[in-house]
Image (cartoon, coloured by chain):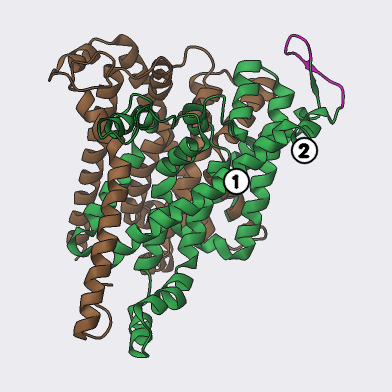
Chain colours: A green, B brown
């Protein structure tokens, strides 16, 4: 009875607006699209087959690869800054965190386009390299996998820094002192004590970065154009440009299935508590 | 965590080198995150009509923004949507967090995992699934209703976990006292626990607002024709390349975010001092 009193709103939200829509697009993914974009109610495996076998499968694999790469770069960039703030931040800790959170909280779209301007053929990077005579022609950075990864790291890095920082702040100082007292070098202490103890932060940061990144649409749209597409670009294309709902649904449900599987495995591996804490 | 370990001199020296290298790396990372933001701010004051270079100082784009009806329209729409979303999501989030914290029942773990889904799911999946749901199954009109429902779907889970996190560090003795004195759980919640949870509730509202306000992908999918929110307006403008007016919007949004965060920080410090 009490469960119903407190939890019915969220249960309705989850069942009606999360599970049911997923079930609907699962159902639609077995249907066909007619000549004028109407839905033809015949059962087919065509759409699913296009993801598993055809060129779409490649784009899915690329999305997973780019997301993995992004995750690795986010850890490589995020861990040092989180460590620095937690350990040496002192009275400036709040300011550092403020500086990390502010850009990630406002005008996502405008920031992405500004980054695009910076790395574009007439952007600051190219102008600088040309005026220093390092290159004679502008580098083609945009519309390459590198540009997409750069955009993804730029967009998602704060979501890696904050959970790692929280994990580092939660470390028990006495354990670190014990490690030093027992003669561990700083290097050894980091890899044998600090890194394993902050596994939770790394794990939750990775969930927060990896899963949304696999399905990212705006970043490949802006930085990859039609040259570097990701799974999210395909879904958006089918829904907004082509208007083929069955195909779009099958792409979206495949994406959802892959991500639910990854989420399930990470939670089983001990990510739940860390993830809930990170949020 | 500062200053751990033995105070040997060689040790100290090594540590300061490490801290300098780390500090330099950290500053580079901040530069990476802030460079586009600084560019937006600088170019919003430049006379360059494409908003991509520094020519001369001007305020004229801000004046133009004042008379831009499309922007005012989109901003109003965005504020209404985010306002409703914040109130409803925070309310649902508080109830849910309380239920999850206090009650034990079958399927609790499953429910918790399910609540995580809308947070970590890519917007494109949530957006497209909701679009098909709204148009093919229950026929919710695309516009305010569909956008607000979609925002509540991805925002209330955030509220749940923020408030749940605070509840774990909460002094529950007041509640026990009220209930020992015969108040029902609902009455206790409204009169005792709820007011005490106010800082946590405010914190979640502060976090949800920008989430909802800045969302583009999900809104774009479920908005239908004519319901232009601010991010959708920005997207439609940026398609044709940057523009100085968009830069002024970006600058103002950053300024508002910074002010909001500073106010929240000061408020929290004041509350802490009052508690001590």
Question: In this picture, which residue range is highlighted in magenta?
Answer: A34-43
Tag 1 secondary structure: helix
Disc on res. A52: 2
Query: Taking B111 as reference, is A76 left or right?
Result: left
Q: Quadrant of the N terminus of chain B?
A: bottom left
Q: How far apart are marks 2 and 1 (CA)?
A: 16 Å
State whether residue A262 is above or below residue A236: below
Provide residue A231's location: percent of width, then percent of height. 62, 34
The chain under label 1 reads A
The answer to whether residue B183 is magenta is no
**Residue A37 in magenta stretch:** yes
Query: Quadrant of residue A50 in the image?
Result: top right
| Circle 1 residue | A65
Q: How many marks?
A: 2
Provide the major secondary structure of the magenta segment: loop
Q: In which quarter of the image is the C terminus of chain B?
A: bottom left
- Left or right: residue A185 versus residue B9 is right
């Amino acid at each position: 009875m009490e469960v119903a009193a407190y939890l019915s709103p969220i249960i309705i939200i989850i069942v009606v607006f999360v599970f049911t829509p997923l079930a609907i697009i699962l159902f639609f993914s077995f249907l066909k699209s007619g000549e004028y974009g109407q839905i033809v109610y015949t059962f087919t495996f065509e759409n699913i087959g296009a993801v598993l076998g055809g060129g779409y499968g490649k784009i899915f694999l690329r999305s997973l690869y780019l997301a993995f790469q992004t995750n690795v770069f986010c850890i490589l960039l995020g861990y040092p800054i989180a460590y620095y703030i937690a350990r040496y931040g002192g009275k400036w800790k709040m300011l550092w965190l403020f500086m990390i959170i502010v850009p990630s909280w406002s005008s996502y779209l405008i920031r992405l386009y500004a980054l695009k301007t910076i790395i574009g053929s007439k952007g600051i990077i190219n102008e600088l390299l040309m005026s220093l005579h390092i290159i004679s022609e502008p580098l083609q950075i945009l519309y390459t996998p590198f540009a997409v990864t750069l955009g993804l790291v730029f967009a998602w890095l704060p979501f890696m820094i904050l959970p790692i920082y929280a994990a580092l702040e939660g470390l028990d100082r006495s354990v670190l002192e014990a490690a030093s007292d027992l003669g561990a070098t700083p290097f050894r202490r980091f890899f044998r004590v600090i890194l394993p103890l902050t596994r939770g932060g790394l794990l939750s940061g990775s969930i927060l970065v990896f899963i949304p990144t696999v399905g990212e649409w705006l970043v490949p749209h802006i930085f990859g154009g039609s040259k570097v597409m990701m799974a999210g670009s395909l879904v958006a294309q089918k829904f907004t440009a082509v208007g083929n709902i069955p195909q779009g649904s099958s792409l979206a449900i495949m994406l959802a299935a892959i991500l639910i599987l990854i989420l399930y495995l990470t939670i089983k591996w001990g990510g739940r508590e860390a993830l809930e804490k990170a949020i | 965590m500062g200053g751990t370990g033995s105070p040997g001199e060689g040790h100290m020296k090594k540590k300061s080198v490490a801290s300098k290298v780390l500090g330099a790396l950290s500053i580079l990372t901040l530069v990476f995150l802030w460079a586009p933001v600084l560019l937006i701010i600088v170019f919003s004051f430049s006379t360059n009509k494409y908003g991509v270079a520094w020519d001369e100082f001007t305020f004229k784009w801000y004046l133009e923004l004042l008379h831009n009806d499309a922007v005012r329209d989109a901003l109003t729409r965005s504020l209404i949507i985010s306002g409703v979303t914040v109130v409803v999501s925070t309310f649902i989030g508080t109830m849910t967090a309380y239920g999850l914290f206090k009650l034990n029942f079958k399927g609790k773990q499953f429910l918790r995992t399910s609540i995580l889904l809308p947070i970590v799911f890519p917007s494109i999946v949530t957006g497209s699934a909701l679009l098909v749901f709204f148009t093919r199954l229950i026929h919710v009109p695309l516009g305010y209703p569909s956008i607000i429902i979609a925002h509540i779907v991805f925002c209330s889970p955030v509220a749940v976990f923020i408030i749940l996190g605070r509840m774990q560090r909460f002094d529950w003795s007041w509640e026990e006292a009220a209930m020992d004195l015969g108040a029902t759980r609902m009455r206790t919640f409204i009169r005792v626990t709820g007011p005490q949870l106010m800082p946590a509730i405010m914190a979640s509202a502060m976090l949800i607002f920008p989430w909802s306000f800045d969302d583009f992908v999900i809104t774009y999918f479920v908005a239908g024709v004519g319901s232009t929110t601010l991010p959708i307006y920005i997207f439609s403008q940026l398609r044709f390349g940057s523009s100085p007016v968009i830069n002024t919007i970006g600058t103002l949004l950053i300024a508002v975010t910074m002010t909001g965060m500073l106010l929240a920080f000061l408020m929290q410090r004041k509350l802490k001092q009052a508690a001590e």
